Amino acid sequence: MSTAGDRIVVVGGGILGLATARELALRQPAATVTVLEKEHAVGLHQTGRSSGVVHRGVYYEPGSLKARLCVAGAEALLRYCDERGIEVLRCGKVVVATSEEELPRLAELERRSVANGVPRVERIGTERLRELEPHVAGVAALHSPETAVVDFGAVAVALATDVRASGGEVLTGREVTELERRPRSVILRTRDGGGLEAAHAVVCAGVQADRLASLSGGAREPRIVPFRGDYLLLRPEARHLVRGLVYPVPDPAFPFLGVHTTVRPDGEVWLGPNAVLAFARERYGRFAARPFDAWDAVTAPGLRSLARRHWRAGFAELARDHSVRLLVAEARRLLPELRPSHVTRGPSGIRAQALAADGTLVDDFVFEGDERVLHVRNAPSPGATSALAIAAEIADRALQGA
């Protein structure tokens, strides 16, 4: 086992873990920064299965940590992509009110956008909406012209390259199974029988965040409850129906943004996602399940309260999960010309949703720990957008008192 020395270990090779490792390597050039990733490559889970939207701060309460990190993170991420030659699709976004009843919620999003400094955001009417998106129906919209799309998987690979170039290590196939605090160090043991001793450890474990926290004596709550999101793909002959990102006005009771369109850098157009309780944290088929993950999900203390409050919405999501026609019908509120024949099933992903014991969906970033071990307990959307800004926040916390 290697000794602690000036070693800093980051657990998790997603975009956030790699951004954190890069930030720590920049701040501590004399230290050895090591990333431990259990999969055979980086960015294979939430990072690589994300829609790739670089959010600009439309939705978030002004003054919140999420709002601050999103606005700063988006600017930093787009600069980084330009510097590294990673393609950025600057397609813009409209958040569309489809009825008069949604206008007050649209006005609130406008207020938040202006307060958060979303660049060039503006409220538009039906005429301007038709110019931007001729096939989209709505009574008003919020236009964010600088919202963009990137390949977060490509960003993760670039960040890993940066870590290695700085003298750090990115070790794949290293699943952490034990995490032991000592007075002046922390011991991390891996499933392959290896281990590292480090001066500091930062855990960015995504859907495994609660389990990794418990290894070092952290609180079991908030529990991670996985939600699966499936996308449909527009067939090539239907891609003309949208030019950019088209979103509904979201329901403020949920952290999900509703069925929307995403234009991808490779030309594909995604429609979705839905949001249903998943019975496997890292398997992506519609019927995928792991007994341990399923038991963890259904026994989460807050799940029963959440289900009681939102059972109607939950059943609607389940129905859309099993019926392409129902998902298309939901999307037709925005795209009335869309037909089931225009779509085919596409990719899916798992959202790591932190759930408090009272059934509250935790909607902001949550950190736990001290200068020896720091856990990122919740990094919801826009976590990937905000990765470089969150990494700076994590580095501040991790190195306090170092």
Image: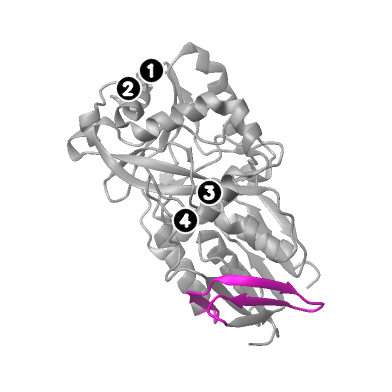
Q: Quadrant of residue 94?
A: top left
Image quarter hosting the C terminus: bottom right
Report the front residue among 97 and 122: 97
The image shows residue 80, relative to residue 116, as above or below, that is: below
Residue matched to label 1 = 126
- Name the residue type under label 3: Ala
N-terminal of the pair, mark 3 or mark 2, is 2
Q: Residues within 10 Å of mark 2 (few under 14, many from 20)?
A: few
Magenta-colored span: 165-193
Question: In the displayed image of the protein, which residue is found farthest to the top?
Answer: 100
Residue matched to label 2 = 130
The image shows residue 328, relative to residue 150, as above or below, that is: above
Q: Quadrant of residue 9?
A: bottom right
**Residue located at (28% from left, 51% from top):** 266
Contact flag, marks 1 and 4 (Cβ < 8 Å):
no
Q: Residues within 10 Å of mark 4 (few under 14, many from 20)?
A: many
CA gap, disc 2 and disc 4? 40 Å
The image shows residue 229, relative to residue 12, as above or below, that is: above
Residue matched to label 3 = 294
Contact flag, marks 3 and 2 (Cβ < 8 Å):
no
**Residue located at (26% from left, 26% from top):** 338
Residue matched to label 4 = 282
Report the front residue among 100 and 273: 273
CA gap, disc 1 and disc 4? 42 Å
- Name the residue type under label 1: Thr
Image quarter hosting the N terminus: bottom right
How many labels, in total?
A: 4
